[in-house]
Amino acid sequence: MGGNRPPIDYGACLVTRHILDEGKKVGFMYREQPEDDFDSGWRFLSGEEDDQYMEDEQNSFITDVDMVIVLDAAIRHYLHLPFGTELERVGDKFVALED
């Protein structure tokens, strides 16, 4: 079958409307303990969301991580990182946030 590997199923994630509907790139991503067996633990934000925005449930969606990869392929290289990871976009890459 010519070296085609089956796609990796990363599971579900939370993504904001800024990314999903408005086409903004992921500016901040973090991984927390999953809420269920389908949850990857990944949360993707543009970095422009404030507390009020995040409190409105209409501004966040649960979708497949694969959907976010389609919108912003740069995240793919970081999806193997462990729970507790927090990354911020710098150019085309992401860097770990320091406490």
Image (spheres, grey):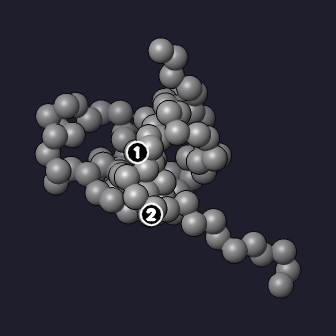
Provide residue 89's location: percent of width, then percent of height. Answer: 51, 32
On the question of residue 7 being in view, the answer is yes
Q: Is residue 80 above or below residue 84?
A: below
Residue drawn 33% across the image and 59% down it: 62
SS at circle 1: strand
Circle 2 crowding by C-alpha within 10 Å: few under 14, some 14–19, many from 20: few
Q: Is residue 30 above or below residue 66?
A: above
Compare marks 1 and 2 and give the one earlier in the sequence: 2
- Say which quadrant the N terminus sits in: bottom right
66 and 73: which one is in front?
66
Q: Is residue 54 left or right of residue 35?
A: left
- The residue positioned farthest toward the top in the image shown: 99
Amino acid residing under circle 1: Arg
Provide residue 47's location: percent of width, then percent of height. Answer: 35, 33
Q: Mark 2 points at which residue?
A: 38
- The residue positioned farthest toward the front in the image shown: 36
Provide residue 74's location: percent of width, then percent of height. Answer: 58, 46
Q: In this view, does 49 lie to the left or right of 39?
A: left
Which numbered dot is residue 43?
Answer: 1
Residue drawn 64% across the image and 70% down it: 7
Which numbered dot is residue 22?
Answer: none
Q: In this view, does 91 lie above or below 46?
A: above
Amino acid residing under circle 2: Phe
Give the Cα separation between the discs numbered 1 and 2. Answer: 14 Å
Residue drawn 29% across the image and 57% down it: 61
Mark whose residue sits in front, 1 or 2: 2
Q: Is residue 92 left or right of residue 34?
A: right
